[in-house]
Image (cartoon, grey):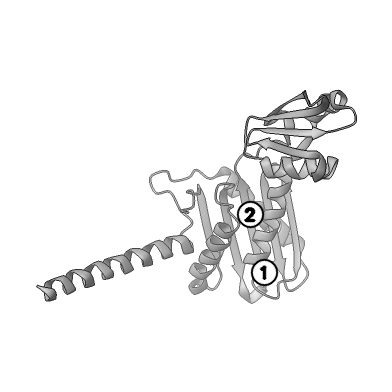
Amino acid sequence: MIMEPLEIFEVYSAVESEAAVYRDITADVMSDLRLASAVGRIRVEIYPPSSLYMMAAILRDVEMPIRISDMAAVDTSYEGGEGFVKITIEREKYMPELTRFLWNKYTPANVNQADRWTILIRAEEPAKEAETLPSQVIANPSQNLHADMIEFSIRCVPEGFRVRYHTFENNEFMFIASEDIIEPNHLEHAKKMLDKLRAAVPDVTATKKADGKEKREAKNKSQTASADASGAAGNTKEGQ
């Protein structure tokens, strides 16, 4: 899967020769965690002599908490003289989260997915359950993204940088890691990184893409395919 273009993707290292390496690491981890569609702008700065790593990112708009009513209609149904809560699926995107929620609340034995679009739930008071279920939250993309961004940062940080600090507010993420105590001036610098990202005007004529391993792998596959094709053509000529 080719990653979506980021508006801004910048990596700076005080050791200039290492900047490209850190950029590749950042892009690879972003791809592994499927965060490319969530991250809009990102800047990373590494200062090896000072054992300091900083990341600032502005995320794209994140969905609000997902309720059952956002993906399904809830009603009651009677089968064989027994009352059930009937859930009619309208959007499948959050089916795993919905299934997990229902199993936790009613146990798997009482949740029957009759077909792809219909779930029947055995409950003591089906009508009462049908009234309360639509408002139940089954997923919170913002919380999930917060956890993913922390994982992303930790996996990008050089080994040994175990003193860490992060913030995540209003779709803005800031992360600092070091081998030593994080100083107030480090926080100020990371905040300025966010300010610059917020104020920057992306170059739409030359969109910066995260050229991680998927791009390199695609190039390698292309080269391999070309080589195989050339070899096959040579063998054909020899056979003639």
Q: How many marks?
A: 2
Farthest residue in the right direction?
124
Farthest residue in the left direction?
240
| Residue in the picture at 76% in, 45% down | 100
Q: Quadrant of the C terminus?
A: bottom left
The residue where tag 2 is placed is: 56
Crowding at label 1, few (<14), some or many (≥20) Cα neighbours within 10 Å? Answer: many
| Amino acid type shown at disc 2 | Ala
| Residue in the picture at 78% in, 36% down | 137
Query: Residue 2 bears which disc, if any?
Result: none
List x then y, in percent, for residue 98.
73, 40
**Residue situated in front as seen by the camera: 114 or 209:** 114
Q: Hey, which quadrant is residue 63 in on the image?
A: top right
Q: Is residue 226 above or below residue 110?
A: below
List x then y, in percent, for residue 153.
66, 61
Q: Is residue 21 above or below residue 211?
A: below
Q: Hey, which quadrant is residue 134 in on the image?
A: top right
**Residue situated in front as seen by the camera: 203 or 126:** 126
Q: Is residue 72 above or below residue 231?
A: above
Q: Hey, which quadrant is residue 124 in on the image?
A: top right
Q: Is residue 105 above or below residue 231?
A: above
**152 left or right, relative to 13:** right
Query: Residue 52 bears which disc, if any?
Result: 1
| Element marked by disc 2 | strand
| Amino acid type shown at disc 1 | Leu
